Structure formats: C-alpha cells, structure tokens
Image (cartoon, rainbow, N blue to C red):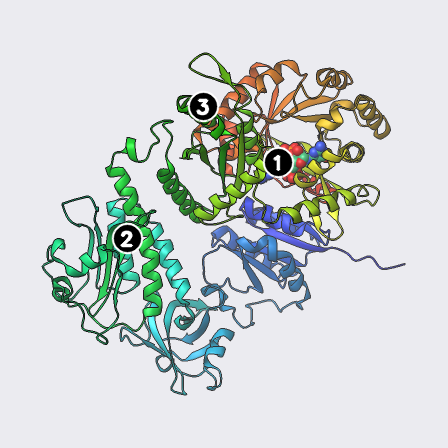
Amino acid sequence: MAATIEPNGVLIFTSRREVRRAVFDALDLDGDFVLLSARDAGQLEALLADAPPLHVVVVCADGSADTAQGLRILRASPAYAALPIVYVVDDTPGVAPEGALDWLRTGAIAAELAQRVRAALQVPAAPAGPAATRSDWRFAFDAGAAWVVASTPDGCILDSGAAMERLWAGSGPVQGRLLSEVFVLANGSGWPVPDGDAMPCLLRRPDGGQIGGEVDVRHIVDHGAHRIAVAFRDLRTVDVAERALSLLAVLDACPSDDDGMSEAAALLADALELDVVAVWSALPESEAGPEVLARIWNGPTPVEWPEAGDLPLLKVCLGGEPLVRLGDDGDAPLADPLVEALGLRTYVLLPLLDERRSVIGAVLAGRCRPSNDARVLAPALRAATARFASALELRRAREQGRARGLVDTLTGLPNRLLFNDRLDTTIREAERTGECFATLLVDLDRFKGINETLGHAVGDQVLTSVAKRLRASVRASDTVARYAGDEFTLILRHIIKRDDVLRIAEKVVQAMELPLSLDDGSELQATISVGISFFPDDAVDGELLLRHADEAMYGAKSLGRNNYQIYAANVDAAQQQQAELKVRLRHAVRNEELRVFYQPQVEAESEDIVGMEALVRWEHPELGMISPGFFIPLAEASGLIVPIGEWVLRTACAQARAWEDRYGLGLRLGVNLSAVQLMQPNLAAVVANALRDTRLEPGQLELEVTESISVKTVPHLVETLDALHAMGCRIAIDDFGTGAASLDYLRRLPADRIKIDQSFVRNIGVDPDDEAIVRATIDMAHRLKRGVVAEGVEIEQHLHFLRANGCDELQGYLFCRPLPTATFEKLLGERERLVSEGQAIPA
Ligand SMILES: Nc1nc2c(ncn2[C@@H]2O[C@@H]3COP(=O)(O)O[C@H]4[C@@H](O)[C@H](n5cnc6c(=O)[nH]c(N)nc65)O[C@@H]4COP(=O)(O)O[C@H]3[C@H]2O)c(=O)[nH]1
C-alpha cells in the first residue's frame, strides 16, 4: 500500500483579517496544508498549548507589540522555537524582521505564498536563537536594484546584490571597498550621508569607467548592528521613449485650465532641466496678438520679457513653422529680442495645432547652455506640445461660453470636446486607482434616412428623445455625451465584471423599444447599435478606446443593428474558441470535469455562517478552471444547462446533506436555476427527485432565480415557482435591482428572499445613487416581509453600511471566496472547533 503523505501544519498568526483570509485562500486550495490561525498572542498561546503538529509559521510583520509578544511565545516554546517563519510585510520597503527565513509582500500572497511555504518546509530546522543566515536586503529596496550594504561609520562595503555585481563585473570584488571610492555624489557630499532618495551620483569602476545614475540611501539595523544600505539606479538604461512617456503622464495629471497649464510648464521645465518654458495662445482672427498663458523662467537673473507682438521667431512659429536650435553650431540664428534677453543657446519653438491643424498658439522651451540630449528633448517636447494644444483648445471652448463650447445645444449633453476631456480625466484617475471602466459608442440606426425623408426638425426631436433615454438608462455618475451627429458616447465607471456593462448595454438598447413620440403626435420607432470597449483591457488611451468601441459598433450593425457588441481583438478566433468549447462542454459532466464550489453566506450581525451558495466551475484539462460567467451562457445557448443544472443540484444537495449529518447546522443551500431550466415542464419533478434521493430537507434548499428572467419569456414561471415553493423549497430573487421589473417581480413571485446585486454593493461609498437603491431595497423587502442578502461584500465599508441599514445576511470575498468542497469542509471544522472552545466564531 502506498504511504499516505501527511499534510503539513501551517500556523497563520496575524490580527489582520484580510491577510488571514488571503493566506487561507492561497494555502488551502490543494489540501497540502492543515491550517491553524491565531489573531493575537493570547489565542496563539492557547493554540500552542494543545501541541498541534506545526511545520511553518506565517506571520504578518506589522511591527505591533502583540505580534512581538506572539513571536516571543513561539520562540520560548521548545517544540516550536526552531520553526521556519515566512513573514508577510506591507508593500512599502522596510527593515528585515529579525530571524526571517523568507518574506513576501502582502500583494504577492496569492501568487507566491504557497511556493515559499513549500520552500520553507525543505529548510532544515535552524537552531533556536538569533538567525545566523545571511541577511536579505530586499527589504530595503525595490526588486532589481543594484544594492550594497556597508558598515557605519567607516562605509566599508560588506555585501552586495547580483545587479551590483553585474555593474561592477570584471573589476574585482566590490566588497571591501569604501562607499566613497565607488559612489561619487553629484552634490559633492562625502559619505556617510543621511537617508534620501534619488540622489544623483556617479558609479566609479576601477577600470576608469563611470556610470551616471542615482542612489537611494537607508540606514538600517541588522541583528543589532548599524548599516548603510545603498541602492544604485543606472540611468543609462532609461530609454528616451520611457522618459517622454513618463513626462507625458505627469503632464497629463495637470488640470486643463490656465493654472494647470502653468503647472505643466513648470513640470516640463523641471523634468527636462529647461531654463525657460513659455506658452502663447494666438487666435488667427484676433487682432490682439499672442497672449502669454504660462511663463516659467529658471535662468540666472531676472529678465524683462519683450512684448509678444515684437518677436520675429514667435511670428514665424505662429505661421506654422517649428524652430529648433540645439547649440551654437550651424547658421546664425534669426535675431530675436526674447532669445537675446534670455541668453538662450538652445531652444525649440513649436506651433500648437488644433484638431483641424490650424495654429492656435506656440510653446517655447530653451536653455542658456548648449544641449547634447536632443534625442530626449525633441520627443518629450512633441508629446508635451500635444498636451498644451488640447488644453488650449479646451480653454478656447470654455472661453466661447460653456453653453456654446462644451455642451451640445440641441440635447444639453456634453459635446465631443468635453467628452474627450472627461475621458482623459477618467483614464488619469483609473491609472491612479486601478479602476476599470467601459466606453460605449451608440449610433442611431438609419438616422440619415429619417433626416432626409422626415426633415431635420424630426431628426432633432429624435436626437433629443434618444439623448433623454440614454441619460435615464445609466447612473448619474456615468457620462453620456453627443459625440457627433447621430453618435453618442458613454463612460461607465467602476466596472468589476463585464457582465455589469452588458446589462447596462442591454438596458440601453431596450430603452429604445418604446416608439418615440413626435411633436405632431405621430410615433417613430428608432433603434440603436452599440459598441463597447474596456479600459484597460482593450486600450489604455482614449483615442484607441473609442476606435475599438467604434469597431464593435460596426460589428453590431453588421449583425442586423438594434444590438450591442463588445470589442474583440480577434472576433473569428473568439468565435472559433467558443464553438470548440461548446463541443467539449457536451462531455464535461461525463468526463467529471465539473466541480461545485461553495461560498458561505453569513448572518450580518454575528458574521456566523448560515448558508452557502453552490457555484459551478469547469476544470478544463487544458485551459484550467473556467468561470461559470463564461460557460453558463454557452451551456444555456446549447441546452446543455439542463443536464449540467441537474448535476449541480444533485451534487450540492448530497453535499449539504452530508454536512448536515456531520455538523447539524441547518445551513441553507442556494442553487442557481437558469431560464432554460425554468422552461422545462418537469423541473419541479427533477427537484423533488433530487431532494428525495439525497434526503435533504426541502426547507434547506433555496432556488435562486435571476431577476433578468422575464415572466413573459418563461411561460408558467409563476406556476413553476409556486409548485417548488409548495414543496417547501425557498425561492430567492438573484441580482435584484438590475432588471426593469424588480417590484413587479416581488409582488408576483413566491420569493422568500432577495439578493441585492453586487454591482450596487460595490458602489457603496462610491455612488450615492446606488447607496440609496441598496437602502430602499432593504427597506422595501422588509416591509414585504422578505429577507435580504447582499452579494459582493468586499470591504469593511460595505459591511458597515449594510449592517447599519439592516441587511440580514451577507456574501462576499470579505468573508470568504467560493471554496472547493474539501476546503469548505475545513472551514466548518474550524468553526466547530472554535465554538467547542467557546471562542469567537471566525468571520
Ligand atoms: N467580485 C466579487 N464577486 C463575488 C464576491 N462574492 C461572490 N462573488 C461572485 O459572485 C457570483 C455570485 O453568483 P451569482 O450572482 O449567482 O452569479 C453566478 C450565476 O449566475 C452563474 N452560475 C454559477 N453557478 C451556476 C450554476 O450552477 N447554475 C447556473 N444556472 N448558473 C450558475 O454564474 C455567475 C457567476 O458565478 P461566479 O463566477 O462563481 O461568481 C459568483 C461569486 O464567485 C465578491 O465579494 N466580489
């Protein structure tokens, strides 16, 4: 008989619930580990008293007194003193926790922890006492930096990283040298210097070679000894394009008003070490002459600026000609009072062009010394110029009056210019916050025909009504703009799941279903085609996002109009893959490739588990775990959802019964029913058989019916659900609030509970409209004597809001992700253990 391999005991010690949860999720997938957790030193002590077999400890190095106390308890126990510890540290660089065998940042738990714990298991137990291993200096620096560590105060280099060895290569060991021999600080300071970042510095090699760069310096304590850690960044590797791009990103963060323009000019001057940056606006039709909008002068002495109208170079540039002078060589420059007054030896004067390529201003960048960095200067300035030009155009539009310039007079919606500005702002924010959003391009089908046959007045009425319906289909925080003629553009913010956007797109298309009423009392049926692209998946710049949405919109048109399509980089390939998967899915049940995961639902006040939702997964042999969000629609389209749904129901009921027999908690089991299943005349019999065969109490089974299923499209929906209800099963309305008929649903269906859709929960703290919907939904459900579960509870803020507003139960990543059967079982086991010990129940 093969020997069974005992799982390794891993102790997780942290008071931070989100870290505990992440560690649990990362380690508890394959059953290799038995996990124990302690939140504080007291709990740790109680746990160790039972002498559980432990092999590795994962500790969150939060610097707290309680963590230090816990570590002392661990080290004081002879059985555990030599256990390897893997530390989890926050994402900012810090100092190595004493005695760390290994460490990782919190952000890397999911990707790296299991591997590091396995590696730690291979390390022979170290003798108790302070670690004698070589220190790991990655704590002090970003990964990949070329670092050295020196003693203090003499600055003798004791240790160095691989990147440093590479820079030093072929020149003997760097250890033993003095910091002052190796690093020459540009400001002339001698070593040691205080802590600091990005200090310009030369790395001097014994072969005489010098490398220009920067150093970050940290004074750290390692095992009680004071050290200086120095990280060197080789600036030779900074590529031209990268510098231009990062400059552009900085400039982009400036607002597009006059202050923003001065801010951008100052940033440009700093980044490129320019002595002067000036921006002029010049309207071709204006008699007033060029107007200075921003003027940065970093030159040695104050100067008197000549009148803009008297500058020959500016005049040439405003005529559309760029002027570049990078040193004293070449033809004698055109005499210019400004160049002379400022003493410029290097300058670039570029025209600013609007979208129609008309000159609307000029930008001057210059230095009082010759330049040898034209490769950086030219592209960086070109990038900056585009930014100044669009700010200038926007400013001009604002000057012309908000009503005329930025808002479309017919529909009252933002126009193209304002939309582009909002899109840029949204991109900048999203880059900072990591938010995902969608861009929709909406085109009226056959609008040209309406305009030509019924006249422009009717065309205008159609556009106005469509604008109103679009505005009404989305949230107040979303943008709807009239982009051009019959084209509208939308930005849908804070998107987590693509499905959320598809739902809104569906709503937008459906919003046109009712005919539009015209002024003369007649009616007209309009339809629209919608293209969707996603930031950042499809593109990270506004122009490309719109281009992709446009392509998708043409895809919708070619599919017969009156529908929406998502941008797909390669539509054919995606369709081909779907067709192949459909074939494969046919055999998934037989091949035992489907799995049921379970996600706990907890009582809002106590956070104790009261139920679970069964969620199917497809473990494709080559593609790995496939989400139901992807394959359930395929299964529905091919009718395969009927056998798959029945398999999920039977598997989950049998499991719920087994847990009931073992733990007796009366947990409720939620199982999703799709519209196709609800259309089967024998559904009630299928459910009854599953309950009979598995011996699960009908009252423990909750069938979840999504709100998007329409009473109209599923014949006998009410009767079917009534029959299931009469059997004793509970009915929950899933995704509540996302459809058009929420109230109607509640009144007509025998629902016991509603599940607030996660798109609303996610916007708690983000969108007051959605908060109001959540509050109203809870209130309405309670008035109608229905229970409420909130889905997608991810952060403490969601929890507090939902609790404060009386939501009964909660489900979401904050408490637990959907878990495979074995892991869920461990969760129940852990709960039982804590309850039997009289301890608080794990959240
Ligand atoms: N972002 C986020 N998501 C959270 C959080 N908590 C739970 N979720 C996810 O939200 C979904 C909840 O299920 P659903 O609304 O019924 O939505 C389900 C359901 O409509 C469908 N589905 C899953 N299993 C079945 C099934 O057996 N039969 C049918 N007909 N549909 C199923 O697929 C959908 C997606 O399932 P999953 O991918 O498992 O996604 C699950 C779950 O993993 C959270 O805090 N944040």
The x and y percentages for residue 21 are 60, 45
Determine whether the residue tagged by mark 3 lies in a helix, strand or loop. helix
Tell me whether the residue at label 1 lies in contact with that at label 3, contact meaning CB atoms closer than 8 angstroms: no
Looking at the rendered image, the quarter that the C terminus falls into is top right
Question: Which label belongs to residue 436?
Answer: none
Q: Nearer the viewer, residue 15 or 501?
A: 501
Q: Nearer the viewer, residue 667 or 672?
A: 672
In this view, the residue farthest toward the right is: 1
Structural distance between the alpha carbons of marks 2 and 1: 42 Å
Question: Which label belongs to residue 352?
Answer: 2
Q: Residues within 10 Å of mark 2 (few under 14, many from 20)?
A: many
Question: Which label belongs to residue 462?
Answer: 3
Instruction: Identify the residue shown where x is 78% and y is 18%.
Output: 727
Q: Residues within 10 Å of mark 1 (few under 14, many from 20)?
A: few
Q: Relative to 186, is 767 on the left or the right? A: right
Compare marks 2 and 3 and give the one earlier in the sequence. Answer: 2
The x and y percentages for residue 35 are 67, 50
Amino acid beneath label 1:
Leu
Instruction: Identify the residue shown where x is 14% and y is 54%.
Output: 308
Against 316, is 472 above or below?
above
Is residue 557 something one can see in this rendering?
yes
Amino acid beneath label 2:
Leu
- Residue on which the image places disc 1: 559
Q: Quadrant of residue 817?
A: top right
Amino acid beneath label 3:
Val
Determine whether the residue tagged by mark 1 lies in a helix, strand or loop. loop
The x and y percentages for residue 83 are 63, 61
Compare marks 2 and 1 and give the one earlier in the sequence. Answer: 2
Instruction: Identify the residue shown where x is 19% and y is 58%.
Output: 314
Against 607, is 129 above or below?
below
Quadrant for ligand 1? top right
